[in-house]
Structures are given as C-alpha cells and as structure tokens.
Image (cartoon, grey):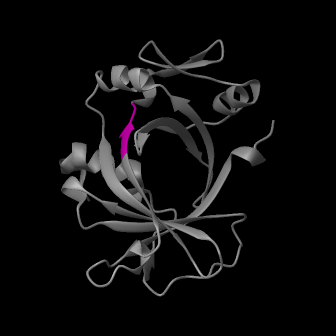
C-alpha cells in the first residue's frame, strides 16, 4: 500500500489581520466554498465512493485499501474557483493526515448539495510564496466567520525547519477546534461552542 503518496503534513497558524496584509502581495487568489458531508452516509462498494446512493468517485485499489484501513474520515466537497473537488482526510497525528482527492462533475456536486444542508465555510485563499520558496496558504474566512484568518503550510516531514513570516500568530497545529470542519460545524450548531 503506497501511503506516502497520500500523506499531508502541515502546520497551521492564526493571523492577526487588523493591520497590513502582506500575504496579499503577489499572491495567487482562490475563492473556496467547502461542504462537509455526513460520514454515516458514505460508503465504498465495488471501488465506488457514494454518498446517500449518489456515486461520487471511482477509487483505485490503493485508495480502497486506504479507505478500508483507516478510520475517522472527514469528507468535504469543495468548489475551488468553479471546479469541484472531493477530498477525504483521516487524521494520523497532530500535523499529519492521509488525504485522498478526486475531481467531481458540477452536476454531481449539485445533486449532492440538494441533499443538504451541510456544514460549510466560504473563504478567499491567498497562495503566498515565502523567502524560502515555500508556499503559504492564507485563508480569509467570509460570512459568519469574517475576521478569522488562518495560515497553513505543507511540509515534507514533521521535523522540517520552517521559515516563519513575521506576521504569523499563534500556532494551532493539531487543535481540532480550529479545523475547517470544526469551524463549519460550529456555524451549523452554535450551541456547541466551548
């Protein structure tokens, strides 16, 4: 099983965005909406991942083994500048997850969203390249999360030395309450706030 190709190692940080926003300079800008699907309605049968009987993605043998071999999958349907992407993540430790990803037709995405509502977030992402050539993804949330700004960076290994921009704030790597899915659920169930 080729797990290495599916590992995502990242660190995440809060940002105080009340002042200058240098990450907006010379950055690629992406508009994102993401919806978190109910895990109890997902299943894999004959190499096809389905949600509530709607076929979402065809899985390779490797992907089927990973899906069956790991638990706690969080599945999101994401609109990335007009393109639909389905992602599944299984957290392994505070900075590492197994991630599977597939393109989804817009008609399929629309059919899934009709089965909602789903916990969701909307954000603008700035892909900013640091002095070391590494790309930071800075998410400025919108709607009821307006004012929340998070930065994340993908790494080759957990012990990789990180050159931190001066505008980074408190590290939140591994804090489940700051995950995108937790923020989306908080908006759906505000009574669950700590």
Residue pictured at 23% horizontal, 62% vertical: 146
Residue pictured at 42% horizontal, 21% vertical: 108
* Residue that sits furthest to the bottom in the current view: 166
In this rendering, would 135 be left or right of 160? left
Q: Whole-percent x and y of residue 86? A: 50, 34
In the rendered view, tell whether residue 144 sits above or below residue 106.
Answer: below
Q: Which residues are magenta?
A: 33-37
Residue pictured at 35% horizontal, 79% vertical: 21
Q: Quadrant of residue 47?
A: top right
In the rendered view, tell whether residue 9 sits above or below residue 76.
Answer: below
* Residue that sits furthest to the right in the current view: 1
Q: Quadrant of the C terminus?
A: bottom left
Main SS of the magenta part reads: strand
* Residue that sits furthest to the front in the current view: 26
Q: Whole-percent x and y of residue 74? A: 49, 39
Q: Quadrant of the N terminus?
A: top right
Q: Quadrant of residue 129?
A: bottom right
Q: Whole-percent x and y of residue 158? A: 69, 67
Q: Whole-percent x and y of residue 193? A: 24, 55
């Amino acid at each position: 099983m080729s797990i290495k190709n599916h590992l995502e190692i990242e660190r995440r940080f809060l940002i105080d965005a009340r002042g200058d926003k240098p990450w907006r300079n010379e950055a690629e800008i992406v508009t994102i909406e993401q919806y978190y699907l109910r895990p109890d309605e997902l299943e894999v049968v004959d190499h096809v991942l389905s949600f509530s009987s709607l076929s979402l993605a065809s899985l390779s043998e490797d992907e089927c083994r990973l899906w069956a071999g790991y638990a706690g999958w969080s599945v999101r349907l994401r609109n990335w500048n007009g393109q639909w992407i389905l992602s599944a993540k299984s957290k392994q430790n505070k900075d590492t997850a197994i991630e599977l990803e597939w393109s989804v037709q817009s008609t399929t995405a629309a059919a899934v969203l009709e089965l909602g509502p789903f916990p969701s977030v909307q954000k603008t992402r700035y892909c900013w390249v640091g002095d070391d050539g590494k790309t930071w993804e800075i998410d400025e949330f919108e709607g009821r999360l307006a004012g929340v700004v998070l930065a994340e960076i993908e790494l080759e290994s957990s012990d990789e030395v990180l050159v931190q921009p001066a505008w980074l704030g408190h590290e939140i790597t591994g804090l489940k309450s700051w995950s995108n899915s937790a923020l989306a659920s908080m908006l759906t169930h505000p009574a669950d706030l700590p």
